[in-house]
Amino acid sequence: MEISERLIDLLRNKAKTAVLTGAGISAESGVPTFRGNDGLWNKFNPMELASIDAFMENPKLVWEWYLFRRDVINKVKPNRGHEILVEMEKYLPEFTLITQNVDNLHREAGSENVIELHGNIKRNKCLNCGAPMDDMDIDPENVPTCDCGGQIRPDVVWFGEMLPEGAIETSQQKTVESDLFFSIGTSAEVYPAAQLPVIAQRSGAYLVEINLTPTPLTQLADEAFSGKSGEILPMIWQAVLEREND
Ligand code: BV8
Ligand code: ZN
């Protein structure tokens, strides 16, 4: 696998870096992706389950799906890809990690400054007043309600819903300011997240993609690595550290 001098120099010179991750970075931890052949969505229609209409219509089914995913996520660990991003955050003075994932694995790996664009599956909130309800036990047969009467829901962003207050604005600002932007393990199909790598390149950042398969970004990227992020990120990092010791 060829790593350009340009990328190594950008990292060694501590370029302002922003990273967008998607479900692919957690695949090697055993978390099913959304659109891969083992993708969660294959079994369910995404618009059917990850939407407010689905929840209003069938809170039991939606909660069963989220409890199933919570159970999967509680059993998995971050992988080398998550860990390298923790190293990068420590090494680079200006580093922003923006994730579409709700699996909490970046935080578990030790990443500090994480922007969770689509929320976090480990958290609950009230559908009505938005109050956090994390330690609530959820029985899909009898979905609990908040004192205000609102039903308790997972604290994730469903299709058609706004992203958390300020999340996309901060992400866009850090993206525009970045000189180096990684798009890792995302099919780049979900907006507004998918816009970030395009904004990065338009703002003059060096755009790097790491993905198992081609995406709409692959043609656009300045450097595209085809493979597993859990293998490619350690190789890129190794090349940087080796050069440090030259
Ligand atoms: C909004 C949280 C506006 C919940 C998720 C038409 C109709 C309806 C809506 C729209 C439309 N056009 C645009 C929209 C807007 C919509 C959207 O973008 N839809 C898409 C489908 C077209 N967006 C929204 O609705 C967003 N909100 O726009 O609000 C608004 C404005 C004003 C007022 C009100 C509203 C909200 C979107 C957030 C939806 N929530 N998740 C949950 O998780 O249950 S999205 C969901 O998809 C996950 O967050 C996931 O991360 C995300 C994106 O998927 P990826 O992460 O990319 O995962 P995927 O499986 O697709 O790809 C994995 C990739 O990894 C693959 O490329 C694979 O090759 C690669 N890979 C696999 N293994 C590895 C690997 N790569 C490297 N290494 C490996 N080992
Ligand atoms: Zn409430």
Image (tube, helix red, strand yellow):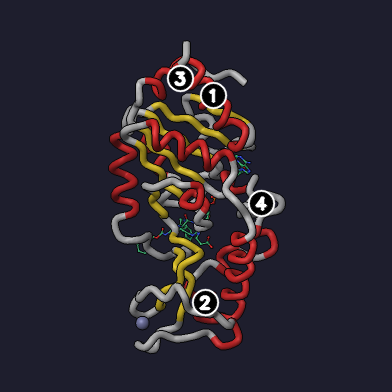
Say if 123 sits above or below 167 in the image: below
**Nearest-to-viewer mark from 2 and 4:** 4
Q: Nearer the viewer, residue 130 or 213?
A: 130
The secondary element bearing badge 2 is classed as helix
Q: Give the x, y percent position of residue 145.
A: 44, 86
Q: Name the residue: 41% across, 74% down.
A: 125
Residue 165 shown left or right of residue 111 in the figure: left
- Which residue in the protein does label 1 denote? 238
Q: Name the residue: 62% across, 33% down.
A: 231
- Which residue in the protein does label 2 denote? 55
Q: What is the CA distance from the residue labelled 2 to the residue labelled 4?
A: 26 Å
Q: Name the residue: 43% across, 46% down.
A: 111
The secondary element bearing badge 1 is classed as helix
Q: What is the CA distance from the residue labelled 3 to the residue labelled 1?
A: 10 Å
Q: What is the CA distance from the residue labelled 4 to the residue labelled 3?
A: 30 Å
Q: Nearer the viewer, residue 33 or 85?
A: 85
Q: Nearer the viewer, residue 220 or 128?
A: 128
Tell me if mark 2 has few (under 14), some (14-19) or many (20+) residues whose alpha carbon lies within 10 angstroms of its own.
some
Q: Amino acid at mark 2?
A: Phe
